[in-house]
Image: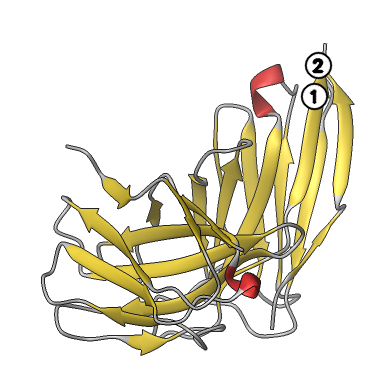
């Protein structure tokens, strides 16, 4: 079953912060976050494994709460280049590399 | 190092025609995947492969067939195209089941 992302869309001004959530009805083994710009391929941002760890690079970080079967992506001091659609992909089995993707969250950063 | 490449980039078919999409990767990845992306639906897995000579069904396999005769190539076939198969098709590959997936540039297919 497809994970649910919220919000569906968000508009920010440069420098503002945003949080994108990803919730699953199934137990999760890993969560993968991607960003896709219009007309381009999804680009990998980060992967979170079981254990509740938080990862990040630059001003983008993420958390994974395996008990709640949720992950959140945090974008701090947003830049124009952050605009795009963000997808979470979840792995619900330890035996497969299959990812099930959420429907996406569209982020628009304005000057 | 080209990464993941897809051929063709665009294609228009008439209902009932057949075609094959080619995905190639030069990263020596074991796993390869075919997705379709429709507005508001995210990425949905069509078929995938865990190694040369293997294939398995994903979430939306009906109307598609795949083959992985060589490790570096993964082919997606449409035997009798239907307008419902109008979509953007992405191929991806990963080193193993734990690794992240790297996507190709996509193929935009329109079926009239």
Task: Determine whether label 1 and label 2 are within 8 Å by CB.
Answer: yes
Mark 1 Cα shell of 10 Å, populated few (<14), some (14-19), many (≥20): some
What x and y, as percent, mark residue B34?
A: 42, 68
Which mark is first along the chain, 2 or 1?
Answer: 2
Q: Is residue B98 above or below residue A38?
A: below
Q: Chain of mark 2?
A: A
The kind of secondary structure element at disc 1 is strand
**Mark number, residue B89:** none
Q: Is residue A8 left or right of residue B97?
A: right
What x and y, as percent, mark residue A43?
A: 49, 43
Q: Is residue A68 left or right of residue B80?
A: right
Rendered residue at 40%/51% (across/down): B103
Q: Is residue B30 above or below residue B9?
A: below
The kind of secondary structure element at disc 2 is loop
Rendered residue at 77%/59% (across/down): B40
Q: Chain of mark 1?
A: A
Examine the rendering and report whether any part of residue A6 can be seen. Answer: yes
Examine the rendering and report whether any part of residue B100 can be seen. Answer: no
Question: Which of the image's four quarters has the C terminus of chain A?
Answer: top right
For residue A67, which quarter of the picture?
bottom right
Residue highlighted by disc 1: A109
Residue highlighted by disc 2: A14
For residue B44, which quarter of the picture?
bottom right
What x and y, as percent, mark residue A91?
A: 52, 75
Rendered residue at 36%/77% (across/down): B48
Rendered residue at 68%/36% (across/down): A84
Q: Is residue B75 above or below residue B52?
A: above
Which tag is nearer the camera, tag 1 or tag 2?
A: 1
Which of the pair A87/B46 is nearer the observer? B46
What x and y, as percent, mark residue B110?
A: 57, 58
Q: Is residue B6 above or below residue B62?
A: above
Disc 1 and disc 2: Cα gap in Å? 6 Å
């Amino acid at each position: 079953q497809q994970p649910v992302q919220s919000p569906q869309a968000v508009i920010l001004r440069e420098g503002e912060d945003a949080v994108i959530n990803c919730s699953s009805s199934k137990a999760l083994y890993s969560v993968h976050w991607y960003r896709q710009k219009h007309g381009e391929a999804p680009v990998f941002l980060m992967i979170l494994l079981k254990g509740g760890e938080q990862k990040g690079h630059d001003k983008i970080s993420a958390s994974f709460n395996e008990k709640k079967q949720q992950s959140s992506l945090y974008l701090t001091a947003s830049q124009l280049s952050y605009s795009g659609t963000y997808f979470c992909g979840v792995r619900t089995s330890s035996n497969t590399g299959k990812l099930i993707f959420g429907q996406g969250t569209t982020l628009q950063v304005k000057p | 190092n080209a990464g993941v490449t897809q051929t063709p980039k665009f294609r228009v078919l008439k209902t009932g025609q057949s075609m094959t999409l080619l995905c190639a990767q030069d990263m020596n990845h074991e796993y390869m995947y075919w997705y379709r992306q429709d507005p508001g639906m995210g990425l949905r897995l069509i078929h995938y492969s865990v190694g040369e000579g293997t294939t398995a069904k994903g979430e939306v396999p009906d109307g598609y067939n795949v083959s992985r005769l060589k490790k570096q190539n993964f082919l997606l076939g449409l035997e009798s195209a239907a307008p419902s198969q109008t979509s953007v098709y992405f191929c991806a590959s990963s080193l193993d089941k734990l690794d992240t997936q790297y996507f190709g540039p996509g193929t935009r297919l329109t079926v009239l």
